[in-house]
């Protein structure tokens, strides 16, 4: 294995060097503006629009055209094109990791370590992260802790989804697509002025459906399908010369059979299950998986321009999320374990910002408030034993913060950034936890009876009420140097903070009421953003070191419990490169490569079901492949009056990633399969655009080699108490899409 690992390192190293060498040698002097790369505008700094290349943050940005051409329907599609990003899906709950920083506890009482903001609004629940992209102008992935401007739990980084603004002229587009697995989709938008008013408006909608990706050889239907629809509306109102208001509303609905953690990764001695062992595109679930989601929200975005130098902004938002998630949680043809997770969540937030351009000093300051009410009743049914475990957790979460960040320009070339945020958060947690025989208890009987006295491994019923508060100051310090308009060098020191919480997977009132504390991260980063050959080549590099303390790690212990603890300290270091080029007007190329070394420094108290207690010091963090890279390109041929044709392809490769602190084994035992070995994914696209730019057609293939792989694995029970279960990645798919602009 060591030799294979070394060879993979060598391959990735040579790929990175080759990409940069080819990019540097393939370019000749520019001959026209059409050979220049498109300027990408971002709003990551909250101080207005800035060019990506002049923003001193490690950002990967995607335009609407890039999302469409790569058939990226939601955040999962960003993984192959973003250095350091890993995303997995556990029964519809998202697990996001950036540079090895993330969380596999996605339920009530816990929060993600890498976050998502929709038009500036923080999304609290990971179950809402896979909503379809709709009327999106761009997506920005900010890598590294965003502890000052974004604050709440953005220890690993944050993904900003920015909607397309209503336009002052009538525009619109409709797109239809069909594909294998009986896929079809229809989406469109229209935007423009409302006649006889100063108002601008836009409305958009999407409908997406495909059959299950994974064949079920047992009694229930195939799994991994999608059946969703969504709407979004925006209204822009200028009020006088200095005041503007944008109102937004969105709605998402899905009714699907999720793939979730549905594939056994080890033999269990059951003939039907063992017969498909190793084939990740086949499962043997004896009970159906079902996920129903309803997610909607409203936001009011107001901006007042006090004068040429100062502006005020208010962002008020309300969001609501409901779901019902039913899973065959033993992932087998045996009727050992079933789980029902419901969710009802409401959140309100308010952010108030002041932006000031005071000559050499640019300042942004503000205050933030967040309040969430969340209920996630859960039933875990053990038919073999005639038992049902009922849990009724409820949470109220209140957070507020004050922040300020300024950039002072000593000269046109040299500036310094200083910022800080104070965050205070309180969580009030209630839980009723009890076991019953043979299903739902009689409502006329005390729900805490009967007591399961004498059953080994099961505690008595209990009710708890607990509260947990934490606060932190998260500063940022940075120096930026711009010797020319095409070169930016920056260095930054940033602190990230994620509040503590509670884990309803814990067993017993002591663990439940104690919960876990906050985690912290200090980031030290240097970066360079550069443009060459009259903006025909971009090379962005960054290197970082993380000092990560009090990590919140979720452990799985017999018989069916999982609990989160502040388990460890860790060190994370890495190097990333992003390259984009246009060597010819008809050729676009791109590449990224990431090296990541993320290890526990001190973690003596680890444990999982397969091995019991062990020392995980020196082991690798979850979802942190040491090497990953993507290379791709597009060639466009102009066929004059019949339009233009394009062909493009990209290839993504990553080395082994682990999903447990045990990595591939402990205590002298190797071969533990809570991991995904090295693999690559090949995608391609052939397209046509009419001469007037109104019609587009494309055929897109993803995972063309039909590579089988998993995106996560867990060890939380099943037929043999300790059973590894994984979430398979999508198989090879093809789709043909046709669009028409107004």
Image (cartoon, rainbow, N blue to C red):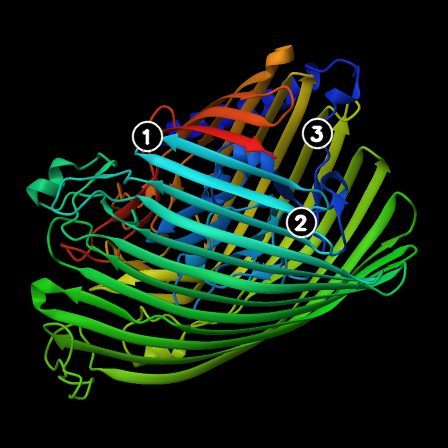
Give the CA separation, mark 2 to mark 1.
34 Å
Q: Is residue 431 left or right of residue 697?
A: left
Q: Between 599 and 535, which is closer to the camera in this rendering?
A: 535
Query: In the figure, 77 relative to 632: above or below?
Result: below
Numbered circle sitting on residue 180: 1
What SS does tag 2 mark? loop
Which one is earlier in the sequence, the residue at label 1 or at label 3?
A: 1
Above or below for 687 versus 239: above
Number of numbered tags placed on the structure image:
3
Circle 3 sits in a helix, a strand or a loop, which is it? strand
State yes or no: discs 3 and 2 in contact (Cβ < 8 Å): no
Closest to the observer, 324 or 252 = 252
Q: Is residue 368 left or right of residue 647?
A: right
Residue annotated with mark 2: 166
Q: Earlier in the sequence, mark 2 or mark 1?
A: 2
Point 57% across, 37% down: residue: 173
Q: Quadrant of the C terminus?
A: top right
- Which of disc 2 and disc 3 is earlier in sequence? 2
Residue denoted by label 3: 538
The foreground one among 514 and 467 is 467
Mark 2: few/some/many CA within 10 Å (<14, 14-19, 20+): many
Which residue is more in the foreground, 93 or 114? 93
> Which quarter of the rendering shows the N terminus?
top left
């Amino acid at each position: 294995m060591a030799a294979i690992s070394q060879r993979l390192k060598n391959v990735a190293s040579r790929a990175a060097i080759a990409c940069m060498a080819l990019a540097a040698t393939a370019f000749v002097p520019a001959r026209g503006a059409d050979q220049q790369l498109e300027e990408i505008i971002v709003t990551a700094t909250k101080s207005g629009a800035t060019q990506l290349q002049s923003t001193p943050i490690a950002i990967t940005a995607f335009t609407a055209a890039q999302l469409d051409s790569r058939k990226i329907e939601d955040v999962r599609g960003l993984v192959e094109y973003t250095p350091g990003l890993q995303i997995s899906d556990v029964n519809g709950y998202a697990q996001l990791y950036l540079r090895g920083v993330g969380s596999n506890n996605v339920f009530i009482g816990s929060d993600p370590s890498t976050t998502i903001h929709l038009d500036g609004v923080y999304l609290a629940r990971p179950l809402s992260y896979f909503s379809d992209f709709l009327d999106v102008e761009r997506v920005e992935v900010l890598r590294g802790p965003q502890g000052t401007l974004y604050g709440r739990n953005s220890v690993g980084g944050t993904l900003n989804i920015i909607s397309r603004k209503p336009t002052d002229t009538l525009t619109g587009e409709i797109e239809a697509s069909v594909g294998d697995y009986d896929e079809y989709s229809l989406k469109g938008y229209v935007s423009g002025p409302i006649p006889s008013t100063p108002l601008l408006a836009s409305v958009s909608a999407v409908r997406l459906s495909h059959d299950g990706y994974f064949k079920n050889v047992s009694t229930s239907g195939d799994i991994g399908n999608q059946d969703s629809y969504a709407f979004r509306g925006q209204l822009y109102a200028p009020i006088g010369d200095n005041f503007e208001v944008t109102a937004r509303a969105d709605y998402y609905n899905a009714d699907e059979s999720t793939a979730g953690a549905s594939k056994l990764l080890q033999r269990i001695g059951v003939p039907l299950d063992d017969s498909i062992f190793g084939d990740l595109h086949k499962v043997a679930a004896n009970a159906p998986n079902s996920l129903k989601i309803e997610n909607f929200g409203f936001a009011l975005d107001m901006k007042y321009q006090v004068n040429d130098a100062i502006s005020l902004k208010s962002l008020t938002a309300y969001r609501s999320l409901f779901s019902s998630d039913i899973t065959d949680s033993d992932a087998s043809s045996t009727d050992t374990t079933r789980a029902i997770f419901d969710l009802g969540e409401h959140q309100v937030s308010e952010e108030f910002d002041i932006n000031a351009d005071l000559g050499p000093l640019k300042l942004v300051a503000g205050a933030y408030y967040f309040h969430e009410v969340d209920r996630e009743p859960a039933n875990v049914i053990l038919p073999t034993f005639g038992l049902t475990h009922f849990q009724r957790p409820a949470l109220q979460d209140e957070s507020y913060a004050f922040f300020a960040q300024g950039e002072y320009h000593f000269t046109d070339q040299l500036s310094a950034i200083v910022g800080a945020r104070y965050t205070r958060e309180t969580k009030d947690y209630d839980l009723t936890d009890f076991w019953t025989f043979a299903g739902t208890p009689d409502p006329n009987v005390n729900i805490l009876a009967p007591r399961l006295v004498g059953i080994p491994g099961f505690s008595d019923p209990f009710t708890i009420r607990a509260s947990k508060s934490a606060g932190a100051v998260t500063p940022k310090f940075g120096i930026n140097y711009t010797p020319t308009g095409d070169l930016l060098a920056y260095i930054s020191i940033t602190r990230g903070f994620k509040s503590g919480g509670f884990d309803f997977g814990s067993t017993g009132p002591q663990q439940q009421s104690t919960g876990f504390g906050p985690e912290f991260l200090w980031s030290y980063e240097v970066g360079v953003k550069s443009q060459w050959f009259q903006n025909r080549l971009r090379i962005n590099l960054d290197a970082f070191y993380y000092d990560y303390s009090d990590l919140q790690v979720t452990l799985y212990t017999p018989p069916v419990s999982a609990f989160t603890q502040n388990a460890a300290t860790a060190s994370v270091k890495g190097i990333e490169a992003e390259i984009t080029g246009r060597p010819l007007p008809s050729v676009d190329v791109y590449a990224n490569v990431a090296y990541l070394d993320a290890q526990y420094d001190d973690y003596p108290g680890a444990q999982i079901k397969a091995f019991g207690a062990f020392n995980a010091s020196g082991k690798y963090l979850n979802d942190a492949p040491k090497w990953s890279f993507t290379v791709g390109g597009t060639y466009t041929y102009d066929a004059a009056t019949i339009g233009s044709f394009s062909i493009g392809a990209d290839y993504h490769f990553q080395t082994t990633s682990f999903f447990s602190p045990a990595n591939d084994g402990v205590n002298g035992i190797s071969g533990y399969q809570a991991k995904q070995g090295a693999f690559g994914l090949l995608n391609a696209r052939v397209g046509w655009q009419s001469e007037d730019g109104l019609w587009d057609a494309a055929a897109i293939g993803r995972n063309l080699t039909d590579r089988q792989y998993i995106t996560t694995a867990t060890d939380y029970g099943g037929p043999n108490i300790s059973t590894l279960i994984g979430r398979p990645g999508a198989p090879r798919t093809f789709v043909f899409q046709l669009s028409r602009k107004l």
